Image (cartoon, rainbow, N blue to C red):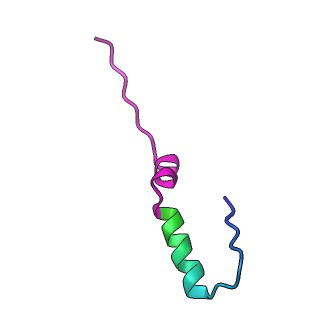
């Protein structure tokens, strides 16, 4: 994944934006391990 930041941001601002992106519910869902157990009933 690539995130492009537009405008002048300092290192702290870039770091915070990356933290927010990594905590996004969609990102967490797509990057989490999925374990599906199937049973016949």
Q: Residue at x 71, y 75 (%)?
A: 6
Q: Is residue 35 left or right of residue 5?
A: left
Q: Residue at x 53, y 64 (%)?
A: 21
Q: Residue at x 67, y 65 (%)?
A: 3
**What quarter of the picture does the C terminus occupy?**
top left
Q: Residue furthest left?
A: 41
> Is residue 27 one of those drawn in magenta?
yes
Quarter assignment of residue 2: bottom right
Residue 41's place in the image compared with 21, above or below, is above
In front: 24, or 7? 7
> Is residue 33 one of those drawn in magenta?
yes
Q: Is residue 4 left or right of residue 21?
A: right
Residue 18's place in the image compared with 10, above or below, is above
Residue 29's place in the image compared with 8, above or below, is above
In front: 6, or 11? 6
- Magenta stretch bounds: 23-41
Q: Residue furthest top?
A: 41
Q: How many marks?
A: 0
The spot of residue 8 in percent (x, y) is 69, 85
In front: 9, or 2? 9
**What quarter of the picture does the N terminus occupy?**
bottom right
In front: 13, or 40? 13
Q: Residue at x 55, y 79 (%)?
A: 15
Residue 37's place in the image compared with 35, above or below, is above
């Amino acid at each position: 994944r690539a995130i492009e930041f537009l405008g002048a941001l300092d290192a702290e601002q870039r770091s915070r934006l990356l933290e927010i992106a990594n905590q996004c519910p969609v990102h967490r869902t797509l990057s989490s391990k999925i374990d599906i157990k199937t049973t016949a009933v």
